[in-house]
């Protein structure tokens, strides 16, 4: 049974609105009812549970901050964060599906697309009738997406797209993909590629030990004819995909707190029940140190995310501020997962508890959307003015 209780050591709930709390409890109830009971089985068999797509749409996880006129939930950035937190409490792979759909597919169509593209795609993406993927990373260009080689040529009445993307969440079942590719002058643009276009295939990536309940794959373009109306007209250059990453990384900063909370809550509960040497292991100083450090780090991460949400609501959050929160909060969560796993002893390595799954999932989360190293260098550049990437 899912007994989860969210820690709120600094009464952060006092800083949330009634709407924030309602949105959070709807997401929490749904995760408890429809995700937690099945997710271990799907992770074990390395399969995305497609039956949860409707539920994700119902809790507003597809386009939380996209205006209602396009089918989005029209919520603020803190509600978006809280939804991500609750979903990732269940599983980082499920949160990935929501992050990609909202911040990497709906966001660029909303921000960089024209009205016809918004009307055509956003409502269907908001209900989950269509699922999207985001193709930036390539086999030879991960941390350095500006080096991409995927390209398109202007053939007069259409574009001809060639190249390959790798490590793409939702690729194996997506209906549409927002793909970043260079034009003949080397400028990066976003193109909406639809399943069924000739020469477009999406082979699944197998043998993952992490994010197993999320489908990952490639996007392969072999002379794909893309209609001209599928180019996103309102922004080009590397800044266009990087702008989407700002939004997704913000959501991950909140999401990681959910995974950490679940690990902490599980370890705390276990430590009060598990008896060794005639007393609960939670009574030993070494275990208390772990728990005390966990709740401290979770509380700091909550404050970082909440303040960042306020800045985002005012449209004042910088890329470097978002980067810091993504890095700190994911690092916090992966460390907590590791400590919490040890507190459960042998039981901690089994699927009876969620911790080992969170721990393995977080290896992807600390790698995608900019690795931990890349985020250190983004902060480094911001505070010194010296660019370590060039
Ligand atoms: P750099 O020279 O810094 O910037 C290139 C151009 O972009 C502009 N810019 C931005 N514009 C808007 N928003 C932002 N956040 C921007 N950041 C930069 C910049 O001003 C410049 O414009 P211009 O006009 O001068 O050309 O670019 P760089 O090549 O040095 O790269 C910087 C670096 C390394 C930080 C960046 O490439 C990076 O962040 N790399 C990490 C790659 C990454 O995060 N990939 C993620 C792939 S998607 C994913 O992982 C999804 S997982 C989803 C899930 O399942 O949840
Ligand atoms: P590399 O860039 O090759 O990095 C290897 C190592 O070198 C890392 O430790 C890195 O930190 C280090 N390194 C690189 N450059 C520097 C430097 N300048 N200084 C110091 N160290 C450096 N991408 C998408 O586009 N869409 C998706 O939906 C998506 N989903 C993903 C899902 C999963 C499960 C995973 C694992 C990845 C996903 N990605 C996605 C790709 C992800 O964004 C990349 O894996 C990530 O950006 C790192 O790129 P890379 O794997 O090529 O590693």
Image: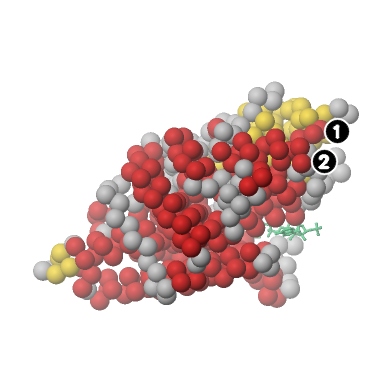
Q: Which residue is mark 1?
A: 154
Q: Which residue is situated farthest in the left direction here? A: 278
Q: Quadrant of residue 319?
A: bottom right
Task: Residue 356: give x, y in percent of width and height.
Answer: 35, 52
- Mark closer to the chain start, 1 or 2: 1
Q: Provide the secondary structure element on which disc 2 rests.
A: loop
Q: Is residue 39 left or right of 204 when viewed as pictured?
A: left
Instruction: Tell me the crowding category of disc 1: few under 14, some 14 to 19, or many 20 or more residues within 10 angstroms, Cα based.
Output: few
Q: Quadrant of residue 5?
A: bottom left
Q: Are marks 1 and 2 in contact (CB under 8 Å)?
A: yes
Instruction: Tell me the crowding category of disc 2: few under 14, some 14 to 19, or many 20 or more residues within 10 angstroms, Cα based.
Output: some
Task: Residue 36: give x, y in percent of width and height.
Answer: 36, 46
Residue at 51% of width from left, 59% of height from top? 19
Q: Quadrant of residue 131?
A: top right
Q: Is residue 351 left or right of 363 when viewed as pictured?
A: left
Q: Which residue is mark 2?
A: 183
Q: Is residue 75 above or below residue 45?
A: below
> Which of the pair 76/211 is nearer the observer?
76
Residue at 76% of width from left, 41% of height from top? 115
Residue at 58% of width from left, 55% of height from top? 75
Residue at 41% of width from left, 61% of height from top? 260
Q: Is residue 297 visible?
A: no
């Amino acid at each position: 049974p899912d007994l989860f209780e969210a820690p709120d050591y600094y009464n952060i709930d006092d800083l949330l609105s009634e709407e924030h709390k309602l949105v959070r409890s709807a997401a929490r109830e749904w995760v408890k009812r429809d995700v937690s009971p099945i997710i271990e089985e799907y992770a074990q068999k390395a399969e995305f549970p497609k039956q949860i797509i409707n539920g994700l749409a119902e809790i507003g996880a597809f386009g939380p901050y996209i205006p209602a006129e396009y089918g989005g939930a029209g919520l603020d950035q803190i509600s978006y964060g809280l939804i991500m937190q609750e979903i990732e409490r269940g599983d980082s792979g499920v949160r990935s599906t929501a992050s990609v759909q909202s911040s990497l597919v709906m966001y660029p169509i909303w921000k960089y697309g024209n009205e016809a593209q918004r009307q055509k795609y956003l409502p269907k993406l908001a209900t989950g009738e269509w699922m999207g993927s985001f193709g930036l990373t390539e086999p030879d260009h991960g941390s350095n997406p500006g080096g991409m080689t995927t390209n398109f040529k202007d053939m007069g009445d259409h574009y001809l797209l060639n190249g390959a993307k790798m490590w793409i969440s939702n690729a194996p079942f997506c209906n549409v993909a927002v793909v970043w590719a260079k034009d003949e002058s080397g400028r990066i643009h976003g193109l909406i590629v639809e399943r069924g276009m000739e020469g477009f295939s999406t082979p699944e990536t197998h043998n993952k030990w992490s994010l197993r309940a999320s489908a990952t794959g490639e996007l392969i373009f072999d002379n794909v004819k893309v209609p001209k109306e599928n180019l996103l007209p309102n922004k080009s250059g590397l800044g266009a995909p990087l702008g989407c990453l700002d939004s997704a990384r913000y959501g991950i900063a909140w999401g990681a707190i959910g995974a950490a909370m679940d690990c902490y809550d599980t370890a705390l509960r276990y430590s009060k029940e598990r008896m060794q040497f005639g007393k609960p292991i939670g009574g030993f100083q070494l275990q208390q140190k772990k728990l005390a450090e966990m709740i401290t780090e979770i509380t700091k991460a909550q404050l970082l995310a909440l303040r960042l949400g306020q800045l985002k609501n005012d449209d004042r959050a910088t890329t470097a501020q978002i980067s810091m929160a993504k890095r700190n909060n994911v690092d916090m969560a992966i460390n907590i997962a590791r400590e919490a796993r040890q507190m459960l002893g042998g039981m901690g390595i089994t699927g009876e508890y969620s911790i080992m799954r969170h721990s393995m999932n977080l290896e992807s989360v600390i790698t995608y959307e900019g690795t931990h190293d890349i985020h250190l260098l983004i902060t480094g550049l911001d505070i010194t003015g010296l660019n370590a990437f060039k």
